[in-house]
Each structure stands twice: as structure tokens, then as C-alpha cells.
Image (cartoon, rainbow, N blue to C red):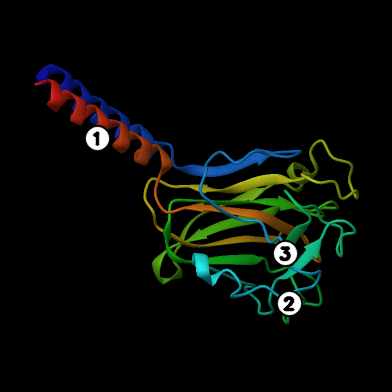
């Protein structure tokens, strides 16, 4: 029995570095992309077209903003206010006019978390992309943790350009080894005047793999002790 306990401990030592090494940006192409992790989901349903969203989800520890000022707003599908797609339901989140530029959502959309997260992402759509999009994760002190660029073509892969179809987009985000993400920014687009929307923001405060591993080891250890 003690041998089994040592085996369980060895598996933990072997698996933990593998979990850490798996931290990476996430791009799951559509149409109707499936998120690679579970967690809390904000789907933006229940609000009317054009409703401004900033502190409406503070109860689950998330607030929304735009880097250049302004407040994100609800885009209802169909008919779309700005011709973007929803990941589920009928609502998505887009931007209002950025005070620094006469365009919608050019500067990006920011989700800020009350507590650090390890896995964060959202369905992202733009039925007429003009360029590529930078996705960034920030930690304590607004320090940039990592960023990557989503090709515009990814958001319309398998979908008709210019047509707002449910699920026409991609799931993008980050999965990190430790819970250190305090904000995620979708955008800006690298093309002037380009805009987009997000939906089904998903987040989890600790690595799902490590949680499952820890639970499995706890159960295995208890069973081993009972047999000794």
C-alpha cells in the first residue's frame, strides 16, 4: 500500500511540470468554437440593445471598460446593431465611440477581475474584419503578462464574410500555470477603424488540470490509508 502512495506522489511530481508547461495563448477557430476549459461564463443575455455595461457583473467579480475611455454596450443578434455575431443566445458586447477616435471599439474591450484568474477567454467575432487583433493579459500593477495576435481571417473561418451568423467567430484567451490574470484586453485591431464584439466571457481562478489532479490524489491517498 505504501508503494501505491509513492506511485501517487511520483505521478504528482511528473504531472505538475507538464501542467505548468501547458500554459499558452488560446485560439479555437469556429464556426461555433468550443472553449477548452470550464468555469464561470458571462453571456450578456437579458439586456436590451445599446445597454452600457461596466459594473453590471461586479457581483461575480468582473467589470468592463475600454482603454481609450467610453463604456462597452450590448449588441443584440439579430438584427445586429453593428453586424457582429453572438457565441450563444442573442447578445454580444461591443464598444461605444472611443473618445480618442471616431470609431467603435477600435481601442479594444477590457474585462477586469476582482481576483486573479488562471484561465480566461471569450468568443470573439467580426463579420467583416479589416485587420488582425491583439489579445493581452495583465497582472498586478497592470503589468503585461503576455499577448498574441489573432488573424482576422480566423474570425470568419467557415463563415460568410459580412453575414452575422450565430457562432461565427473564434474563442480566444489564455491558460496560465498560476492564477495571475487580473485583466484581459481584446483588441485593438491593427487596422484603422476596425471593430468587433465578444461574447460568453469565461474565466476560472485556478488551473483546471491542477485542480483535478489535486482532487484525484486526495481521493487516492484516502483510499490507500484506509487499506493500510
Mark 2, residue position = 98
Q: Which residue of the protein is positioned furthest toward the front in this rendering?
A: 226
Query: Dot 2, how many residues are within 10 Å of its Cα: few (below 14), some (14-19), or many (20+)?
Result: many
From the viewer's perspective, tell me whether residue 149 is left or right of residue 61: right
State which tag comes first along the sequence, 3 or 1. Answer: 3
34 versus 139 height, above or below: above
Asked if 153 appears above or below 219 in the picture, the reply is below
Q: Position of residue 127 (x, y in %)?
A: 84, 51
**Which residue bears the numbered disc 1?**
218
Q: CA distance from mark 3 to mark 2?
A: 25 Å
Q: Residues within 10 Å of mark 3 (few under 14, many from 20)?
A: few
Helix, strand or loop at disc 1?
Answer: helix
Question: Could you say where residue 191 lies in the image, as x and y percent from the top left?
Answer: 77, 60
- Near mark 1 (Cα within 10 A), the count class, few <14, some 14-19 or many ≥20, is few
Q: Identify the image quadrant of residue 81.
A: bottom right
Q: Which residue is mark 3?
A: 46
Residue at x-position 71% and y-position 75%: 52
Residue sitting at x 80%, y 43%: 156
Amino acid at each position: 500500500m505504501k508503494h501505491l502512495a509513492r506511485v501517487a506522489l511520483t505521478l504528482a511530481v511528473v504531472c505538475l511540470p507538464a501542467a505548468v508547461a501547458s500554459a499558452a495563448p488560446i485560439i479555437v477557430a469556429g464556426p461555433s468554437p468550443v472553449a477548452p476549459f470550464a468555469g464561470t461564463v458571462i453571456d450578456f443575455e437579458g439586456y436590451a440593445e445599446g445597454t452600457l455595461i461596466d459594473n453590471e457583473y461586479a457581483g461575480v467579480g468582473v467589470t468592463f471598460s475600454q482603454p481609450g475611455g467610453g463604456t462597452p454596450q450590448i449588441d443584440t443578434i439579430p438584427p445586429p446593431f453593428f453586424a457582429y455575431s453572438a457565441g450563444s443566445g442573442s447578445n454580444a458586447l461591443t464598444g461605444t465611440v472611443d473618445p480618442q477616435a471616431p470609431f467603435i471599439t477600435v481601442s479594444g474591450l477590457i474585462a477586469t477581475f476582482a481576483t486573479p484568474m488562471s484561465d480566461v477567454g471569450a468568443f470573439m467575432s467580426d463579420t467583416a474584419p479589416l485587420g488582425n487583433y491583439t489579445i493581452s493579459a495583465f497582472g498586478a500593477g497592470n503589468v503585461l503578462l503576455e499577448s498574441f495576435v489573432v488573424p482576422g481571417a480566423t474570425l470568419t473561418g467557415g463563415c460568410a464574410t459580412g453575414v452575422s451568423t450565430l457562432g461565427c467567430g473564434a474563442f480566444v484567451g489564455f491558460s496560465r500555470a498560476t492564477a495571475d490574470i487580473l485583466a484581459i484586453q481584446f483588441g485593438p485591431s491593427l487596422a484603422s477603424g476596425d471593430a468587433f464584439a465578444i461574447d460568453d466571457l469565461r474565466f476560472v481562478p485556478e488551473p483546471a488540470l491542477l485542480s483535478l489532479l489535486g482532487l484525484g490524489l486526495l481521493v487516492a491517498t484516502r483510499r490507500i490509508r484506509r487499506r493500510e
